Amino acid sequence: MTTDAFEPSPKGDAAALKSAYAGLGRTSPIRRLRNNSAAALITLAFLVALSPLIAVLWTVISKGLGDFDPYFLTHSMRNVAETDSYGGIYHAIEGTLEQVAMTAVIAVPLAIFVAIYLVEYGRGRLATAVTFFVDVMMGLPSIVAGLFILAVWILGAHFQASGFAGTLALIILMLPISIRSTEEMLRLVPGALREASYALGVSRWRTIARVIVPTALPGIITGIMLGVARVMGETAPVLLLVGTTSSINPNLFSGAQGSLPVFIFGEAAQPEATAQARAWAAALTLILLVMILNLIARLIAWWKAPAGSR
Amino acid sequence: MTASDDAIVADPAPADGALNGPRKRRRGAENPLSAKTGSGDAVFAGLARGSAIFILVLMASIAAFLIFQAVSAISQDKSNFLTEFNWDPDGNNSNGVPHFGIAAIAWGTLTTSIIGLILGAPIAIGVALFITQYAPRRLGQVLGYIVDLLAAVPSVVYGLWGLLVLDNHMAGISELLHDVLGWIPIFATNGTYGSSYFTAGIVLAIMLLPIVAAISREVFRQTPRENVEAAYALGATKWEMIRIVVLPYGRSGVSSAIVLGFGRALGETIAVALVLSTNFTIVTKILEPGGNTIAANIANSFGDAGPVGRQALIASGLVLFVITLGVNYLARTITRRGSRKAVAA
């Protein structure tokens, strides 16, 4: 960063301008002061923004490491009192992974088809309406998605709380994210590829399935993984729909299931230091999972970037 | 859409045998160029179209089911749903007679989000300016990624941090603020601090910051190079250039980013539910503990809610839905007006 009044970024121009500028006299002190204080304020804003990230990560790591060990990851909270110092989150990890995996299995194909419709087929009123409602879904508060499944699935159809009920709400949250990112990636595929394929007599759907989607695939995967990371941390809808249990329940479709975010929410509200320690360790686990997904997604994007633009 | 569709779908059968060969081998005996291909196309188009229609049906049914349950709850409400402060849909304090209303929690939702916006938006714009205008290009990309990480942290973790770490420091900060600004009514207190709208506002500010920063960054990055050079050529300092070129250019984009961030803050549930100490009054002193928001109330009251209680929570969720819908519509209008202006200019 520089406080120099003249800093157009192309290097050659900067030198030329600077020499021209030398003959023009100085910028007035007040303007220079204003310029410098603006630079200082903007830099300060950046540092202020960075501080909560560092503070949150630091506390989660330093407080979370206390309970974070193999025992914690492989045992459940069955028959563990809040005041006990042992206990673990295996049930919550298993529940969250199952719910998120099922969410991806259902939401991803649906999202890809909607995106294909919008990019390849969609003209006229239906496409406009879908684009509009995907926008609306983007802004849908996660708790409202939870309430919707509550109204339909539990109050309406009289199903019990289960991991799958949570999955349904997560699908609603994941759909718009995946549709939007897939749509953007499909739009980046050069039209020439499409035309070349048609010119060879390949039918429309084969062109899409064999040429267009594979070309955009790395970008699509990146978007989907970011979406998965996003829904993995969702607490509110899962809280309403999955129920609470301290035991391991591998069955997604029946009975209350554990969930990592809901576990953190529950333990955080307890006054006992032992419960709070578990909350921090679970938060560390959740952040690790989310960050690993994020990292893999970015790596794919970075790695495969040349393939996407060929 | 049909005209362009048919043009390509209609004749998938080239007479060229060279193209036929390899396909035949892959597909076995079946001839890929017969009517099969046409039906494949129809199935595929149908799937895509069906998925698109499914989205519409989904949104329509979300609205329908929420309205149905909400109306059922509101019709049992013995208070005015819009003006009542208290939340007692199962009648725990009045012999089973439901009394509930969203006045206090809707107030809390708006107030905490506005505090979050006032604290977070200027910093977010500063971050976007720093990344696009001040930091070297390479470094800017890395810094942008780091700010994006803020958005990846799950909200429950912010809630945990806000409750167990930030709130312990809030007493001191709030007291300082009270000492300096206590003559303004909203900063007055009865001597207790923490778990307040102010604390919730700070957590919301942290959460909406990456959204506003990310969109503003994209907008600032698109500032036309010529305008920047022109400002420098006229002798502008860097800050003057930002003020006369970058900020006006990005105004509509940044406004819509701020509104989108506001929408995110309105719907934020878990972090606020953890941080705020619940009560159902219209809190006007933002440093004192107490208050509630629509979303936090749903998370906190759900566990104990009876049949009417659940429907009442759905009714409040519908109100939240309508508010965020309006806010997002506003954001889109701002963007559209901005792009139209850009085209005109």
Image (spheres, grey):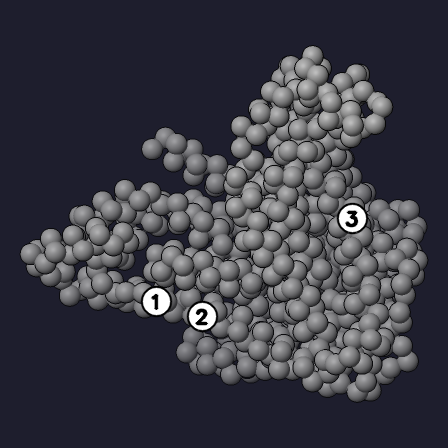
Per the image, the residue denoted by label 3 is A105
- Residue B151, position as x, y percentages in the image: 57, 60
Per the image, the residue denoted by label 2 is A48
Q: Is residue A284 left or right of residue A195?
A: right
Give a yes or no on whether discs 1 and 3 share a subunit: yes
Identified by mark 2, the residue type is Val
- C-alpha gap between disc 1 and disc 3: 47 Å
| Front label number (1 vs 3) | 3
Quadrant containing the N terminus of chain B is top right
Do tag 1 and tag 3 residues touch (Cβ < 8 Å)? no
Closer-to-camera residue (B82/A22): A22
Identified by mark 3, the residue type is Val
Q: Chain of mark 1?
A: A
Per the image, the residue denoted by label 1 is A41
- Residue B324, position as x, y percentages in the image: 62, 48
Identified by mark 1, the residue type is Leu
